[in-house]
């Protein structure tokens, strides 16, 4: 009897001392939509990720390209952004946000039959409106941010993007690491995103926020070109379709998200149709970024595909 009791106590102590990262079930009420899991939610324990140690040492770059499908100078800016991404595809990412300083202007408006698609979304419009009212450096399209680094203003002409991207890449001032895992279920069109934030610099824990952009990889659609011609076969890339939790500026990261010395944030969402109404989850991806909630500077960004 004493032997059995000893074995039980030893086993209990062993299990209790075992540290599991991002444990399931979550220690915080995360309000996940469990109906998106095609089965018993209790079985999701078998699919909840356990993150390995993040050995990344590189700080990545996010270019937010504020654009419009009727903006004649925007295609050149989009080409430049795409070229910067292709030059370093694992560290430079693009979000093409169809909004201006007034939210929606003529550049973003729908005017059939030549321009029938609405590329805007509520979160993108809200971002444009906010910075249009609060940042004097956003006069119109095309303009962009590079990690929202403040170089007199966080909004820059495309002529500044190349040098700013190179500066950000070379300085490589990594303050926070990010890892993510995603489980997608074609049956429900639902997905669960799990994010780990690892503060390399402990000071970033103050005023820390997280935002997740949902983007459509590419779509052939209408675009006004530099010579005012109408191109019906233009390839729109990295189209910002909205933010997870419908929050334009994400949310603060707090001690409630802290497990050990890292932060864990989890999301559930439905993968939408493409802008043309077709469904193709493999043509969608997420950009996850951590930022300073006071200065807006983006500390780190990573890409997560919906379908690997």
Image (cartoon, rainbow, N blue to C red):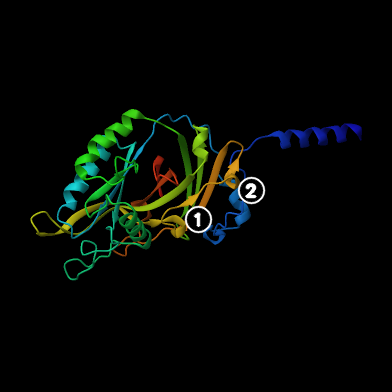
Q: Is residue 235 above or below residue 5?
A: below
In the orientation shown, which residue stands out farthest toward the left? 227
Q: Quadrant of the C terminus?
A: top left
Which one is nearer the viewer's eye here, 236 or 306?
Answer: 236
Left-right relation of 66 to 273: left
Mark number displayed over residue 73: none
Residue 216 coordinates in the image, percent (x, y): 32, 54
Q: Nearer the viewer, residue 105 or 42?
A: 105
Q: Position of residue 162 (x, y in %)?
A: 23, 37
Q: At 21% from the left edge and 61% from the top edge, which residue is drawn?
A: 107
The reply to whether residue 300 is visible in this rendering is no
Q: Locate residue 128: give its quadrant.
A: bottom left
Q: Residue 183, how many percent across, how many down?
A: 49, 49
Q: Is residue 279 above or below residue 183?
A: below
Front-lying residue, 93 or 138: 138
Q: Circle 2 is placed at which residue position?
A: 27
Mark 1 crowdedness (10 Å alpha carbons): few <14, some 14-19, many ≥20:
many
Question: How would you rate the neighbour count of disc 2 (Cα within 10 Å): few for under 14, some for 14-19, many for 20 or more?
Answer: few
Residue 56 visible in the snapshot: yes
Q: Looking at the image, which residue sits at the far right? A: 1
| Residue tagged 1 | 268
Residue 140 drawn at (x, y percent): 23, 55
Front of the two marks 1 and 2: 2
Q: CA distance from mark 1 to mark 2?
A: 16 Å
The residue depicted at 16 percent of the width and 48 percent of the height is 76
């Amino acid at each position: 009897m004493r032997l059995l009791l000893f074995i039980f106590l030893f086993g209990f102590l062993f299990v209790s001392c075992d540290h599991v990262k991002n444990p399931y079930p979550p220690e915080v009420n995360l309000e996940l939509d469990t109906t998106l899991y095609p089965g018993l939610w209790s079985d999701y324990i078998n699919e909840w990720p356990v993150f390995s140690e993040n050995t990344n040492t590189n700080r990545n770059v996010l270019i937010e390209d504020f654009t419009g499908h009727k903006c004649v100078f925007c295609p050149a800016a989009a080409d430049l952004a795409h070229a910067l991404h292709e030059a370093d595809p694992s560290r430079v990412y693009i979000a093409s946000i169809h909004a201006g300083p007034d939210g929606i202007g003529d550049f973003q408006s729908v005017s059939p039959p030549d321009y029938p698609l609405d590329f805007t979304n509520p979160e993108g419009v809200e971002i444009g409106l906010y910075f249009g009212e609060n940042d004097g450096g956003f006069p119109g399209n095309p303009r962009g941010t590079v990690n929202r680094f403040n170089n007199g203003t966080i909004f820059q002409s495309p002529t500044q993007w190349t040098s700013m991207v190179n500066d950000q890449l070379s300085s490589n001032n990594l303050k926070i690491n990010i890892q993510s895992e995603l489980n997608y279920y074609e049956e429900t069109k639902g997905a669960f995103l799990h994010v780990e934030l690892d503060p390399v610099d402990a000071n970033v824990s103050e005023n820390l926020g997280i935002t997740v952009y949902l983007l459509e990889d590419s779509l052939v659609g209408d675009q006004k070109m530099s010579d005012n011609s109408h191109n019906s076969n233009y390839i729109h890339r990295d189209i910002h379709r909205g933010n997870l939790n419908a929050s334009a500026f994400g949310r603060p990261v707090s001690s409630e998200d802290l497990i050990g010395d890292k932060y864990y944030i989890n999301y559930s969402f439905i993968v939408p149709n493409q802008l043309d109404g077709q469904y193709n989850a493999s043509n969608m991806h997420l950009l996850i970024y951590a930022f300073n909630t006071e200065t807006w500077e983006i500390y780190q960004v990573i890409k997560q595909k919906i379908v690997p």
